[in-house]
Image: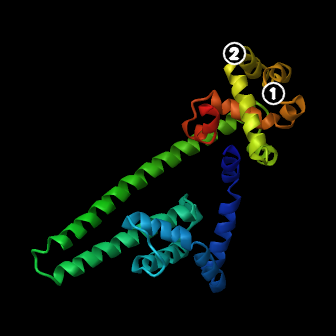
């Protein structure tokens, strides 16, 4: 949901993770073991994505993933522009692919040349590597476009006297409250008169909204900033931000 985006934008969790990595790089072995252990599900998920099958902690590929995650921790630098987890995902997948290719070559060298099964495994590893490269490129493009949208949205919020910090602090905590706020926003955007007032005055037309929705004036005022933000996204061309309010667009 939108609140999740706001929390992501503040990067609090990312900063916390970066601090842990810095301590590990300075020699905190206990914290290193703790971090690796807590991210085992993340490691298994990415290894499984490459192997195209379920991976357990007893599999050799999982061990390769653990080593790769530790490598990512040691080599990571926030100055490179990506998060630790994005960096680790790339390292894990590359190391697992290298392992698969190495195993395929070893097996091919130890059996007769006419063993088509081993040839197919090597070709499969090559296909996986190509597929991963395409996926990584697409993810980079998506991330760039997403950052551009967030930047534009931030500027738009300023025009309406809002900020991301306001939205983080004042977004409704309960799902029902968020849903009601989204319904109010959708009602606003679909009414040309109210939408014009909103864009002109940079304020919610609360009196008009109160007559159109089954939500109390007190609730509208309490969630005013959230409703304004949702309204701006709905009436914009933001592709990625609209993913967070898909429920509004489909109701």
Q: Quadrant of the N terminus?
A: top right
In the rendered view, does 211 fall on the left or right side of 100?
right
Q: Position of residue 32 (x, y in %)?
A: 61, 80
- 52 vs 101, nearest the viewer: 52
Horizontal side of 220 relative to 4 (left or right) equals right
Task: Reply above or below: 74 against 161.
Answer: below
Tell me the distance, in whole angstroms, between the alpha carbons under discs 1 and 2: 19 Å
How would you rate the neighbour count of disc 1 (Cα within 10 Å): few for under 14, some for 14-19, many for 20 or more? Answer: few
Residue at left offset 42%, top offset 63%: 49
Secondary element at tag 2: helix
Above or below, comparing residue 42 to residue 59 in the picture: above
Residue at the (86%, 35%) spot, across then down: 219
- For disc 2, the neighbor class at 10 Å (few under 14, some 14 to 19, many from 20) is few
**Which element carries disc 1, helix, strand or loop?**
loop
Residue at the spot x=64%, y=80% of the render? 34
Q: How is the image coloured?
A: rainbow
Q: Quadrant of the C terminus?
A: top right
Residue designated by label 2: 192
- Find residue 214 and name its label: 1
Residue found at x 66% / y 77%: 23
Sequence order check, earlier mark of 1 and 2: 2
Q: Which quadrant of the view contains residue 118?
A: bottom left
Q: Nearer the viewer, residue 174 or 166?
A: 174
222 to 202, vertically: above or below: below
Residue 217 at x, y percent in the picture: 88, 29
Q: Quadrant of residue 99?
A: bottom left
């Amino acid at each position: 949901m939108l609140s999740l985006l706001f929390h992501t934008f503040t990067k609090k969790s990312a900063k916390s993770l970066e601090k842990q990595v810095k301590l590990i790089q300075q020699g905190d072995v206990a914290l290193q073991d703790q971090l690796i252990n807590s991210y085992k599900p993340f490691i298994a998920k990415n290894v499984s994505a490459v192997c195209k099958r379920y991976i357990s902690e007893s599999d050799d590929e999982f061990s390769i993933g653990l080593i790769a995650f530790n490598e990512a921790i040691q080599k990571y630098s926030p100055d490179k522009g990506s998060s630790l987890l994005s960096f680790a995902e790339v390292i894990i997948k590359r190391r697992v692919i290298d392992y698969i290719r190495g195993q395929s070559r070893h097996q091919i060298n130890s059996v007769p040349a006419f063993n088509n099964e081993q040839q197919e495994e090597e070709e499969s590893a090559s296909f996986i590597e190509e597929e991963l490269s395409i996926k990584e490129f697409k993810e980079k493009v998506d991330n760039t476009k997403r950052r551009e949208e967030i930047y534009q949205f931030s500027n738009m919020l300023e025009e309406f006297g809002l900020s991301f910090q306001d939205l983080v602090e004042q977004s409704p905590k309960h799902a029902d409250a968020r849903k009601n706020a989204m319904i109010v926003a959708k009602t606003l955007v679909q009414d040309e008169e109210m939408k014009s007032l909103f864009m002109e005055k940079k304020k919610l037309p609360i009196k008009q909204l109160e007559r159109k929705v089954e939500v109390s004036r007190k609730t509208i005022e309490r969630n005013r900033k959230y409703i304004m933000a949702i309204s701006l996204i709905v009436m914009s061309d933001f592709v990625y931000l609209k993913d967070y309010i898909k429920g509004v667009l489909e109701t």
